[in-house]
Amino acid sequence: MAANSDEILHDFPPMIRQYKDGRIERLMGTETVPPSVDPETGVQSKDVVIAPEINLYARLYLPKSAIPGSKLPLLVYFHGGGFVVESAFSPLYQKHLNCLVAEAKVVVVSVDYRLAPEHPLPVAYEDAWLGFKWAVSQSNEEEWIKEYAELNRVFLGGDSAGGNIAHNIAVRFGAEKLDGVNFIGTFLNCPFFWGKEIIGNEETHGITGRDYADRLWHYACPGTTKGCDDPRINPGKDLKLSGLGCKKLMVYVAEKDILRSRGLFYKELLGKRGWDGEIEVVDVEGENHCYSVEYPTGEKGKEMIKRVASFLNQ
């Protein structure tokens, strides 16, 4: 073993660590569970291949109450994990989406995009766009989408880094469009937005909090030329923001989350840029980052899922 094999090059506890010899150690988000019929909710799930040449997969979810020919909203979802950990197949997201699908009675396509640093950004964005296009083009192919999904009611959603991805896919849809798709709204749960300038209460988290977010973005997106003012992480620098491709947004932020101020500022940004849609921002007291993903059956987790279900069925 090389003498320097245990020397750490990048360290992002509790998520990931990279050593100077190139080894990557994921400290969380590596466990997976198979698709199933959930005994508590009756929600079914199955895995599909989107693009085998790049190992791009997704997990599909179907509520117990689904009836062939009775169409349900379609939600394309992106998991969190700082662009570097977690998957669409983890027990964390299996439980979270089982709860959401059971309450909202929607069809979900949870895209398993590839992770940095092995696949640095923009790979995750490209995978997400491929996954979105695949989901909305399956009216005559994939059985669950063909039989149960209504492409006249398409939504995007995601938490943390997945919320960032959902936002960027909504912006791309606004610029490129997809024929025959009625993209209604986007749900962002504690989205990972950032920027060079301190805003709101970010300074109360100390230099460690800001330094962590700065470093994580550069680690996941080493090719960025604008750093934390890259428009993909800082919507305030995105000249395409006014063309956001949906007309409805729901954004959740949490009081104890360092990303809270960015989520609140997102609404102000959209208004300044002239986006003419509707946005609801829900600021939850006393909670941490993505609390509802961690505890979907807790009191506040259930409350959020009910509210998101209402958003998806408007």
Image: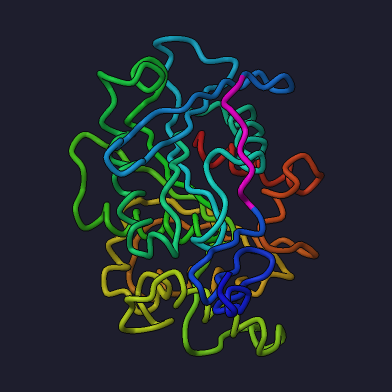
Above or below, 152 against 234 in this view is above
When asked about the image quadrant of residue 238, the answer is bottom left
Residue at (52, 41) in percent of width and height: 88
- Horizontal side, residue 297 vs residue 191: left or right: right
Query: Does residue 138 show up?
Result: yes
Note whether 165 is above or below 57 in the view shown: below
Q: Residue at x 38, y 76 (%)?
A: 222
User: Who is closer to the viewer here, 149 or 35?
Assistant: 35
The correct choice, above or below, for 148 with respect to 96 in the image is above
The boundaries of the magenta stretch are 29-36
Residue shown at the point (68%, 62%) measured from the top left: 289
Percent of width and height locating residue 41: 69, 22
Residue 263 percent location from the top left of the image: 55, 68
Question: Which residue appears at 44% of the width and 65% of the height?
Answer: 117
- Secondary structure, magenta segment, majority class: loop
Is residue 247 one of those drawn in magenta? no
Q: Is residue 302 above or below residue 270?
A: above
Q: Position of residue 170 (x, y in %)?
A: 34, 54
Q: Quadrant of the N terminus?
A: bottom right
